[in-house]
Image (cartoon, grey):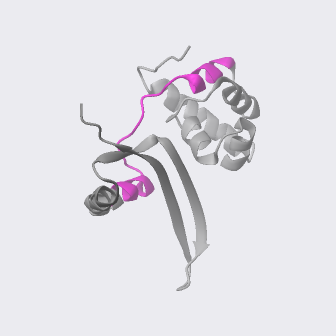
Amino acid sequence: MAHAQFDPAARQALAVKAVEAKTRKNLTWEQIAGAAGLSVAFTTAAVLGQHALPEEPAEAVAKLLDLDEEAVMLLRTIPTRGSIPTDPTIYRFHEMLQVYGTTLKALVHEQFGDGIISAINFKLDVKKVTDPEGGERAVITLDGKYLPTKPF
């Protein structure tokens, strides 16, 4: 049976423990995702408290990170999602949406019509590429299913 969280504090505390274990064991998010058998983006979000993991992936992640049965239970609960950004990297994503949000909305609606892009039926990828002008660039792909508005 699926259970939802009321207070995000427990998941935040678990995220702190999990990241400490990840650091202590010198693991990557890719390795943790491999143990879970899920994508690196989804697994990372789940461990950081933004998704619930199915039973077997939750148990595998807990085992890899030496977390207890309570952690498995918390990893399986439906979290209270979202946060107020204070971290500069997260804030920059909010800034990108403040600057380009209306542009993205206009382009999506022009191409697809009235509706939304799902964050549930969704894929995320992050790649580091070389910038031809020097340095590096982050290529972030947000791939969500388009859900048209249905009149009723």
Inspect the magenta stretch and tell me whether residue 70 lies in it: yes
**Residue 37 position in % (x across, y down):** 71, 38
**Residue 110 position in % (x across, y down):** 29, 60
Residue at 41% over, 19% down: 6
Nearer the observer, 59 or 148 = 148
Q: Which residue lies furthest to the bottom in this view?
A: 133
The image quarter containing residue 147 is: top left
Inspect the magenta stretch and tell me whether residue 75 lies in it: yes
Residue at 47% over, 28% down: 79
Asked if residue 68 can be seen in this view, the reply is yes
**Residue 119 position in % (x across, y down):** 44, 43
In this rendering, would 87 be left or right of 1? left
Give the residues in magenta.
Answer: 69-95
What quarter of the picture does the C terminus occupy?
Answer: top left
Q: In this view, does 19 lie above or below 88?
A: above
Nearer the observer, 72 or 103 = 103
